[in-house]
Amino acid sequence: MSTVAEQLRQAREAQKLTVHQVADITKIRTDHIRALEEGNFDMFSAPVYIRGFVRSYATLLKLDVPQTMAALDASWAGRRSSASRRR
């Protein structure tokens, strides 16, 4: 199963949209679009921004938004549990 980041990138490429076109439509900065597609969520100052940007981006790409958000939440749960095991 692909990650949320991979799903966003693959859907954008399938629709032949550039990062700049997505940024123009969504008003999300191009560096943030790239970070979302790379799964580089550390770039964002708070999870609320990630959730909002992923929701907007998934909506634009006509992805299943509830499913995408659930996958995002599941990936965070996995990160938190692996981080707590390292402590």
Image: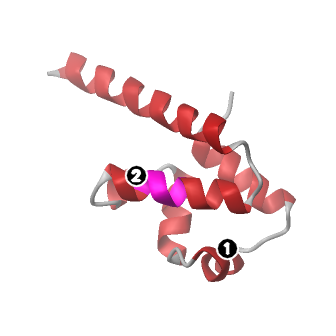
Q: Is residue 83 left or right of residue 41?
A: left
Q: Nearer the viewer, mark 1 or mark 2?
A: 1
- Is residue 58 shown to the viewer in this render? yes
Given the image, on which type of amino acid does mark 2 rest? Phe
The numbered dot on residue 41 is: 2
User: Can you give x and y, in whole percent of width and height, for residue 59 in the image?
Assistant: 68, 57
Residue under the point 62% across and 60% down: 57
Name the secondary structure under disc 2: helix
Instruction: Tell me if mark 2 has few (under 14), some (14-19) or many (20+) residues whose alpha carbon lies within 10 angstroms of its own.
Output: some
Please give the range of residues in magenta: 50-54
Residue wearing tag 1: 22
Within the magenta stretch, is there residue 66?
A: no
Q: Nearer the viewer, residue 56 or 21?
A: 56
User: Can you give x and y, in whole percent of width and height, for residue 36 in the image?
Assistant: 52, 56
The numbered dot on residue 34 is: none
Residue under the point 85% across and 57% down: 14
Given the image, on which type of amino acid does mark 1 rest? Val
> Is the C terminus in the top left, top right, bottom left or bottom right quadrant?
top left
Specify the quadrant of the image occupied by residue 37. bottom right
* Labels 1 and 2: the sequence-earlier one: 1
User: Can you give x and y, in whole percent of width and height, for residue 77 in the image?
Assistant: 38, 26
Q: Is residue 54 left or right of residue 16?
A: left
Q: Nearer the viewer, residue 29 or 35?
A: 29
Q: Is residue 69 depicted above or below 35 in this figure?
A: above
Specify the quadrant of the image occupied by residue 2. top right
Residue under the point 67% across and 73% down: 22
User: Can you give x and y, in whole percent of width and height, for residue 76 in the image?
Assistant: 40, 33
> Is the N terminus in the top left, top right, bottom left or bottom right quadrant?
top right
